[in-house]
Amino acid sequence: MNNIVNIVINDTPLQVAEGTSILHAAKMMNVHIPTLCHHEDLCVAGNCRICVVEVENDPNLVAACATPVRENMHILTNTSKIRTARKHILELLLTEHNINCIKCSHSNSCELQHLALEYRSDEEIFIDLRKPSRTDVSSYAIQKDDSKCIRCTRCVRTCAQLQGVNALTMANKGNLAKMSTFKEKPMAEVVCTNCGQCINRCPTGALTERTYIEDVWNAIYNPKKHVIVQTAPAVRVALGERFGLKSGHRVTGKMVAALRAMGFDSVLDTDWSADLTIMEEGTELLSRLKKVLVDGNTSTVLPMFTSCSPGWIKFVEHIFPEMIPNLSTCKSPQQMFGVLAKTYYAKKKEIDPANIVSVSIMPCTAKKYEANRSEMRDSGFQDVDYVLTTRELASMIQQSGINVLTLKNETYDSVMGESSGAGVIFGATGGVMEAAIRTAYELVTGREVPFDELRITPVRGFDGIKEASLLLENTTEEYRFLEGVELKVAVAHGLANARNLVQAIKDGLVSYHFVEVMACPGGCLGGGGQPIPTNIDIRAKRMDAIYKEDEKMSYRKSHENQEVLTLYEEFLGKPNGELSHKLLHTYYTERNRY
Amino acid sequence: MISNNEEFISQLADKYGRNRESLLPMLQEVMDQFYYLNEDCMITIAKELDISTADVYGTASFYSFLDTNEQGKHVIRVCQTIICDMKRKEDIIDAITELIGIKPGETTHDGKFSLHYTNCLGACHKGPAMLINDEPYTELTPEKVKDILVSYMKK
């Protein structure tokens, strides 16, 4: 246990644990100190200096984020000296920043903009150091605009620390220092997984998603096009934040109403295809287990990795190509939905698939890349035409003039709109695993999983790597080969955790049958397309909301989803059947390491 | 050629150890061997040390004496800091340009020389000063520079 030290902040005494930063101590007594390079999810950098405070008997101002408190420290956070310094720091940052707020998609969520407004920074006392630069638009998912970068290194730390990818670095030094990829290559050519976590943490608009809002409006306005939309599970628990609601406020019904009012011809749910994913992936897992345990098939490998997270997929393709055989061949729910929209849905609704425009609303930037992968055209068209983030949807709702909060709750349209609670929890880390276990256990034993209210708590929560095991007993005739098998599973979220887990598996330190990985911290609810800001409190509230949404559903297990069962009956045949393999499964490609 | 690079870098990794701390000495040895850090070398180093290529590039681009762009065999660095400037470093640059035909930031077509400005070499009392590879030259005059460069042309 840390020692307690006595400090004084602005004449108010306070006792805090030794080692606490001045910034954190001030926050505990509701004294706000501005920050730019500091982020709760990341290590301390202390490079922007905007958080400077005065410490008695110290001739220099100190950075509050990087200075731990010590006994009898007297701290002042609002003096003439501090204010002047902060204004100068801000002005200096602004001399390099491309101030283009009205055209910037990060306007309103930009921390630099907030500070400039707060400090009424209207004088230009320093010379203009802005350098022209070209925005990197090579990636389908992420745009990088160096002219807005303030070199706080949050993106570099995010990519290294949270994601273990290191696609970004600080290159050069001094006034030439810049956020860069390897040899300043375009984002589309480097190890970037498109997870977008850097976007969520960029204090300016230097990193943004590539937007497809105009394309979607054009499709909606085109009377010849039948525009359908799918919404991912994690969108409904975060969209409200963009309309002033507290984190964790669910807006499912209002979101559906808004989408319908905006002019989408059919409002459908990715949760439906999440349930479908469980049917396909669960079946694949059981068949892999049979191949390994009964047939002794050496070309089949375990553990099987989930394949829902396109950031994780690209990560494996770059970093662990030797583990590609471990990836489930199932497409992600977005892509299963996309391919079925232009085949099954088109047939059922008697619409020419050439006239269907398929839009998806995702908490994710990597999904934009995924939709554009050349493999994702099994319907004969690009399966998903446009992917919008939660943030882009919020912008579109604002543009449409709809007051989303006053709308009455509506429900999803039919054919591909029904979902179970298992589909909903895909949005949280551990959710796919929980959904899979709920179905697979019942398939194998004929009984519900032995957890209170179907809550499989060992795979829930924010631990970086979670493990669980489940003994399979009294199995049904078909799955007798699993009798007495202890099913071992693991869950990782955030690619840095995933990297550690995969390395441990490769080194033979751990062994599992099934592993779920989500690229983003907290799973999709912390995705790169979600409202900004993000931190552990916000993510925890979104997670609570997801599990609440699950519990209110009438079906809680994927195999009970009636519209999924109808799909198999009328169209696909059986899970992992021939047509399933053609439409719902895919393959992966080894990619270079730089 | 590429496989030779790989073998060379693998030997360096054996020598210094496969951890991040080995990055700088390895980059320095590659510099000595190839006069600059080409892309393949940086990728191979990243693989050997199991770190990202961006990481290698970040480190390499930080240091003035590590070059990520192609350089001549002999790198001339003329001090641009205030004392050498007052002692007419521009005359030195002009003399070099006249003799080998390159301006600061350029490399000769035969790949023999590159010319750069550098910050203070710590020889202010003997300015103007320049560095060719690791060798300092001080109290320069245009005539002296010509003699020095001619001696390098023969190397």
Image (cartoon, grey):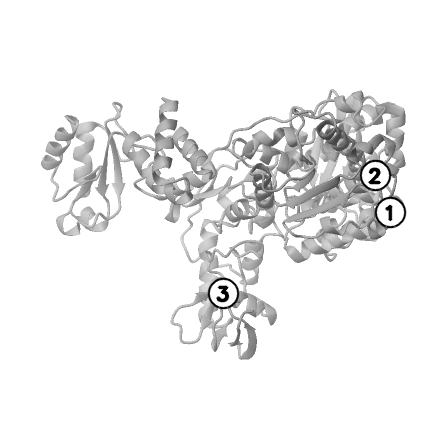
Q: CA distance from mark 2 to mark 3?
A: 50 Å
Q: Which residue is mark 3?
A: A64
Q: CA distance from mark 1 to mark 3?
A: 47 Å
Q: Residues within 10 Å of mark 1 (few under 14, many from 20)?
A: some
Task: Identify the subunit bearing mark 3.
Answer: A
Q: Residues within 10 Å of mark 2 (few under 14, many from 20)?
A: many
Q: Residues within 10 Å of mark 3 (few under 14, many from 20)?
A: many
| Residue that appears at 86% across and 29% down | A567
Q: Which residue is mark 2?
A: A558
Label tally: 3
Q: Mark 2: which amino acid?
A: Ser
Q: CA distance from mark 1 to mark 2?
A: 11 Å
Q: Which mark is residue A197?
A: none
* x and y, in percent, of residue A228 in the image: 80, 33
Q: Nearer the viewer, residue A34 or A454?
A: A454
Q: Mark 3: which amino acid?
A: Ala
Residue A138 visible within the image: no
* CB contact under 8 Å: marks 1 and 2: no
Q: Nearer the viewer, residue A66 or A381?
A: A66
* CB contact under 8 Å: marks 2 and 3: no
| Residue that appears at 82% across and 32% down | A479
Q: Which residue is mark 1?
A: A553
* x and y, in percent, of residue A531 in the image: 67, 49
